[in-house]
């Protein structure tokens, strides 16, 4: 575990030295937002892994500035706020993530590659908002209609997980 943490920190350090990180100093660089968001995503997930919740929240907000329709990061920021004890702010982030997901899903073809993944995210957000039945209904429907075995297994693993288990892990019952 310690070796993994050191590796993640090294990746972040070297990412700062890479040509991709130059976009942080050069606003004219082509695809600046893409480069920046990749850098911040690596930094964000490293901070989450290291349980640096306050720092991860700041980094997550930087990602949201670059990619405001990123529902995954939005609800993960909510989870981080919840872990720091700020449940009021966490609910605001969960609700905002749900708005983003609904808007995207409403315009998406159900056969799209991302549709299944986004529906799972919606189910998780509903559970985080205390709507266990609605979240489980989506997960059950997803499981029943999924044809890829690994996706079915993932759907099944999420089914009936409580919001506490989603936030703190399966062992948190």
Image (cartoon, rainbow, N blue to C red):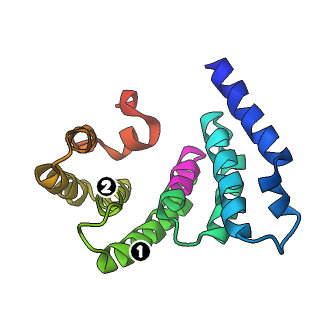
Q: Which residues are magenta?
A: 76-85
Q: Residues within 10 Å of mark 1 (few under 14, many from 20)?
A: some
Q: Residues within 10 Å of mark 2 (few under 14, many from 20)?
A: some
Q: Nearer the viewer, residue 17 or 47?
A: 17
Q: CA distance from mark 1 to mark 2?
A: 15 Å
Q: Nearer the viewer, mark 1 or mark 2?
A: 2
Q: Secondary structure at mark 2?
A: helix
Residue visible at 38% across and 78% down in the picture:
103
Identify the residue under disc 1. Answer: 99
Residue 80 covered by magenta stretch: yes
* Relative to 83, residue 92 above or below: below
- Would you say the magenta stretch is mainly helix, strand or loop? helix
Report x, y in % for residue 101: 39, 69
Q: Earlier in the sequence, mark 1 or mark 2?
A: 1
Left/right placement of residue 136 relative to residue 98 reads: left
Left/right placement of residue 128 relative to residue 132 reads: right
Residue visible at 50% across and 67% down in the picture:
92
- Residue that lies at the very extreme toward the right in this rendered image: 25
Report x, y in % for residue 62: 70, 63
* Relative to 58, residue 8 above or below: above
* Occupied quadrant, residue 36: bottom right
Label number found at residue 166? none
* Occupied quadrant, residue 115: bottom left
Identify the residue under disc 2. Answer: 120
Q: Nearer the viewer, residue 131 or 30?
A: 30
Residue visible at 83% across and 72% down in the picture:
27
Which quadrant of the figure contains the N terminus? top right
Residue 6 covered by magenta stretch: no
Q: Nearer the viewer, residue 106 or 86?
A: 106
Q: Nearer the viewer, residue 15 or 119?
A: 15
């Amino acid at each position: 575990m310690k070796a993994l943490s050191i590796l993640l920190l090294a990746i972040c350090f070297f990412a700062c030295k890479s040509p991709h990180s130059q976009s942080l100093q050069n606003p004219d660089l082509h695809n600046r937002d893409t480069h920046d968001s990749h850098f911040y995503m690596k930094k964000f997930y490293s901070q989450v892994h290291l349980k640096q919740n306050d720092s991860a929240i700041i980094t997550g907000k930087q990602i949201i500035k670059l990619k405001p329709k990123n529902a995954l990061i939005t609800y993960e920021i909510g989870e981080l706020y919840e872990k720091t004890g700020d449940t009021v702010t966490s609910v605001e982030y969960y609700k905002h993530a749900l708005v983003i997901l609904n808007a995207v899903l409403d315009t998406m073809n159900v056969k799209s590659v991302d549709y299944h993944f986004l529906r799972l995210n919606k189910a998780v957000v509903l559970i985080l908002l205390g709507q266990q039945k609605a979240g489980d209904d989506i997960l059950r429907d997803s499981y029943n209609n999924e044809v890829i075995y690994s996706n079915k297994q993932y759907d099944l693993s999420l089914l009936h997980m409580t919001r506490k288990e989603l936030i703190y892990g399966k062992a948190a019952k």
